[in-house]
Amino acid sequence: MDTITSIAKIDTIKESVVTIGNFDGLHRGHKVLIEKTTEYAKENSISSVVFTFKNHPVNYFRPNSVKNIITNSEKIEILKSMNVDYIINIPFDEYMTKISGHDFIKEILLDTLGAKKIIVGHDFTFARNKEGNTKLLKELSKKYGFELEIINPIKLDNVRISSTNIRDLISNGDVDKAYKYLGRYYKLSGKVIHARKIGRTIGFPTANISIDEDMIVPKVGIYATKVYINGKTYYGATNVGYNPTVNGKNLSIETNILEFNDDIYGKTITIEFLERIRDEKKFNGIEELKIQLQKDTNYVFKKYICKSKKLMVQ
């Protein structure tokens, strides 16, 4: 498996099947395109190619207007796990805004990548002024003799799977619903940073992580989460919010990690959002806050840790 990070570094491939897309989030719908690509490649003994972008094209024109569902490195890891032969993972830059749709197809997809078949979603556009579209692909498939497959919207429970819908669900705190369409739980990674350390003084120490401004952050509230630290898995109660009871002012993501008490300052951990438990609330003092935090952690312990331990025993 090769990962290619610029147009200039693409080596000529004799024969391939290519799918093109932003693959924003690599959700269940995207996986249909990629699975069709790898299956066709295997059946015809040619190479499978996924052509995608490091950054969302919209953000090239309007920086930071679209938040990421996964990081670029996560996208690569998922694609590797799907047994893709070549991953073209380039920045969407000025070059992509100037090349014509015809030249992109002829020079890159056909002449360089040796595409015998191209697979795209029904609404995907590329190249200058979005002129690379299904209409142009249909015209050129007849002219140059390559096979074209256009995938209609993929639906689950009669709802179209889309990155926009998944992003909205995460923003609204519906992380369990996002899981259904994404195919995995939404997660955030960050370095554990020093904060006010108030939780430690009231018996609920938390790991605060740095917030990646490029990633979408779930709605303010308390979440049941799975926590990955140094290759090991734990569960926790994560607060996304401002800590109003102790007069917090800045947004933070902090997790009370259950059955864990190691010093992890400076280490990068991953938080996977399983479900939203409740809204963030300003309590009438520390004692009332402690009672609620105990309820939150008990909920996570009973629902997730006890269940996990029962499965291990079986």
Image (cartoon, helix red, strand yellow):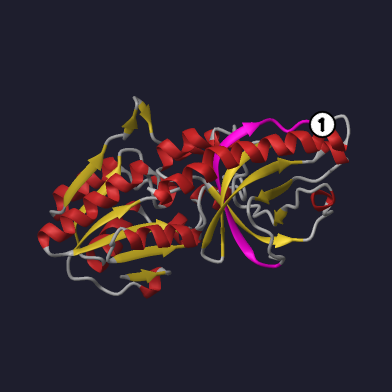
Residue 173: in sight, yes or no?
yes
187 vs 94: above or below = above
Indicate the position of residue 285 as horizontal and vertical percent values: 88, 34
Q: For residue 16, which quarter of the picture? A: bottom left
158 or 93: nearer the viewer: 158
Quarter holding the N terminus is bottom left
Q: Is residue 152 left or right of residue 302?
A: left
Residue at position x 56%, y 38% in the image: 302
Residue 91: in sight, yes or no?
no
Query: Dot 1 lies on which element?
Result: loop
Q: Residue furthest front?
A: 313
Amino acid under disc 1? Lys
Q: Is residue 260 left or right of residue 182?
A: right
Residue under label 1:
282
Residue at position x 80%, y 46% in the image: 250
The span shown in magenta is 266-282
Q: Is residue 38 magenta?
A: no
Q: For residue 27, which quarter of the picture? A: top left
118 or 306: nearer the viewer: 306
Indicate the position of residue 116 as horizontal and vertical percent values: 16, 58
Q: Residue furthest top?
A: 158
Indicate the position of residue 286 as horizontal and vertical percent values: 86, 38
